[in-house]
Amino acid sequence: MAPALTTTTAAVTATVSDSDSLQLSSAKMRSHEAMVGMAHKGKRLAGIPKFSTFAEKRQWQLEHMAGAFRVFAREGYAEGISGHISVRDPEFEDRFWINPLGVHFGLLKASDMVCVNLDGDVVGGNVDASINNAGFQIHSSVHRARKDVHAICHTHSPHGRAWSAFARPLEMINQDVCYLYKAHSVYSEYGGIANEESEGERIAKNLGDGKACILMNHGLLTVGETVDEAAYLFCLMERSCMIQMLADSAGHKKNYVSDEEAAYNFRMASTPETLYTEFQPHYQYEEAMSGGSFKQ
């Protein structure tokens, strides 16, 4: 059953189907090229689904949000009550869904999520739950600053925390890290636990129009058009931090991916649709292992 959403409007009947013009934008052309290029002989994968109602899309988002938490739990990203994922509501631009405080990532279900507005008022979902104040400050600031961002992931993952101590961006030392080529920043003004709005605003400003940010002495943050995109980027960034430190510790000369090749890799593999698709095997595995219980 979909979590309740308090609203003063009548039952939702408006559609959220795609209304693109016949003329594809350059971004859509790039996404199409990338999706076709993923499969042998251009057998294009399905990509991000479309929905006829806001309610259907909302439930789908919450299920994938809960699935992403299950992936994060299996990967070892949970740390006490820290860490959060948020997803912007598909109908109300000034509202987003976030996980309740004090529930392990591996136990979260779609019905556990809390809907809040940008002022911090709980307006739907699991209305009896608390949420992480620092999480609200960070996520609300990014959602307010980036209308194109619909999902945000932030946890205190082990290798992300370790690499964040250096306050350095990741180097383009392998094919996969190129998905973050010139699309991630470093926030090097650590201001303690982000309980104040100003810290969230500084993080959002540092993120800029990028896909990810390394928060010095803190952890990692990724964003996306879908929770799947943001979650896949987070997993990729965490592993890239680990691989960076392994390569650095070897003490040998590193070979770097050239700017030309890194830009090509980014163009072909870092569109919202391709990154959504990259996450599906992880989601499907969690669905199979749990019998889909996180969708409840």
Image (cartoon, rainbow, N blue to C red):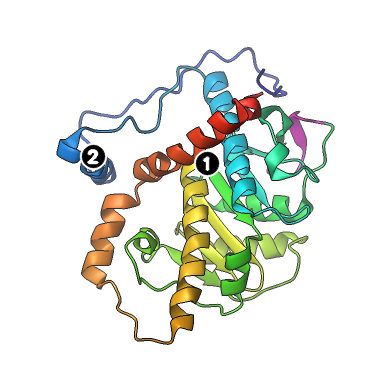
Indicate the quadrant containing the C terminus: top left, top right, bottom left or bottom right. top right
Q: How many marks?
A: 2
Whether residue 123 is visible here, answered yes or no, is yes
Q: CA distance from mark 1 to mark 2?
A: 23 Å
- Find numbered disc 2 in the image and state the secondary structure of the residue it sits on: loop
The stretch of residues the image draws in magenta is 117-127
In this view, the residue in front, 91 or 57, is 57
Neighbourhood count class around disc 1 (C-alpha, 10 Å): few under 14, some 14–19, many 20 upward: many
Whether residue 90 is visible here, answered yes or no, is no
Spot occupied by residue 259 in the image (x, y as percentages of width and height): 26, 71
The residue sitting at 57% across, 41% down in the picture is: 68
The residue sitting at 43% across, 77% down in the picture is: 247
Spot occupied by residue 186 in the image (x, y as percentages of width and height): 53, 71
Task: Check disc 2 and report the residue beneath it.
Answer: 39
Q: Residue 184 sits in which quadrant? A: bottom left
Q: Mark 1–mark 2 contact, CB under 8 Å?
A: no
Q: Earlier in the sequence, mark 1 or mark 2?
A: 2
Q: Is 164 on the left or on the right of 243, as rendered?
A: right
Indicate the quadrant containing the N terminus: top left, top right, bottom left or bottom right. top right
- Give amino acid for label 2: Ala
Q: Residue 39 sits in which quadrant? A: top left
> Does the stretch in magenta take in 118?
yes
Q: Is residue 13 above or below residue 234?
A: above
Q: Is residue 21 above or below residue 132?
A: above
Looking at the rendered structure, which numbered label has been put on residue 227? 1
Q: Residue 209 sits in which quadrant? A: bottom left
In this view, the residue in front, 217 or 76, is 76
Closer mark to the observer between disc 1 and disc 2? 2
